[in-house]
Amino acid sequence: MDPKIMMVIVAVIFAADMGWQMFQNKKRNDLFGRLSSFLAKKEYEAFDELIDSPESKKLFPAFNIAFLKLNEAMLKEDKDAVDQAFGQFNVRMNNAQKEALYKKGFYYYLGLEDKTKTRTYYDLLKGLKVKDEQMIDVMYDTYIDKGYKYIEDVKALSEAGSEEQRMPYYALLADMYHNAGDEEKASEYEKIVTDHTEKLKAEKKG
């Protein structure tokens, strides 16, 4: 997967995940923390045992369990398992859950440049009328249609926020200018992103 696409995907998917991961119940929070820790450490056997335990089934709705299993499959970079995990959501979902799932599918298959499946999740998101619908359109146009019609909109977005917050937009602009055939501008934005990445690496070493 292109690192620049990954930068944008991570920024958006993180926001999508947070909507359903916040629990009021302390037991659920503690259990979710343990499951997240196993995933972060790539301790998949421990994760599988806990997620399939009676404790998890008692505390988590079926959607949350399926969503966590989907995260595991993605972390393993097992495409067949991911495809299968997406097919496990045969449960009733509210709009917030649908949005989280559809965004997950959209950005995952976008990163794989799977036009058919990306289109499926794109259409599902359009049907939900999500708040960040314009960014969904931008990503689809840029990475599936190989377009650049949203350059001015993204440039406007890139002018706000901190340096760190601007980087995903700069990465996106670089690809838009590649699509437009303007390699000079594309290189200009790529250099900004590269310099920022190198700066962060140097700071961590220091």
Image: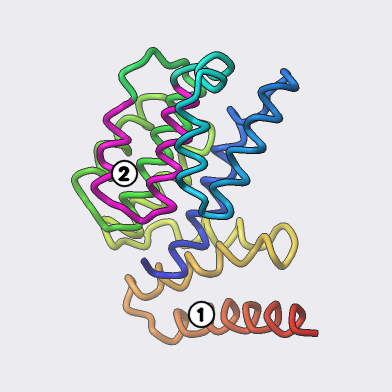
Q: Which mark is residue 190?
A: 1
- The three-letter amino acid code for the residue at tag 1 is Glu
**Picture quadrant where residue 98 is located:** top left
Ranked by sequence position, the earlier of labels 2 and 1 is 2
Q: Label 2: few (<14), some or many (≥20) within 10 Å?
A: many
Residue 153 is left or right of residue 122, and the answer is right
Foreground label between 2 and 1: 2
Q: Nearer the viewer, residue 79 or 192?
A: 79
User: What residue sits right under mark 2 in the picture?
Assistant: 82
Which residue is at a point 28% across and 62% down the rendered structure image?
146
Q: Nearer the viewer, residue 200 or 121?
A: 200
Which residue is at a point 53% across and 58% down the rendered structure image?
154
- The magenta segment is 63-88
Which residue is at a point 63% across and 32% down the rendered structure image?
32
- Residue 197 on the magenta span: no
Asked if disc 2 and disc 1 are in contact, CB closer than 8 Å, the reply is no
Q: Residue placed farthest to the left in the image?
A: 116
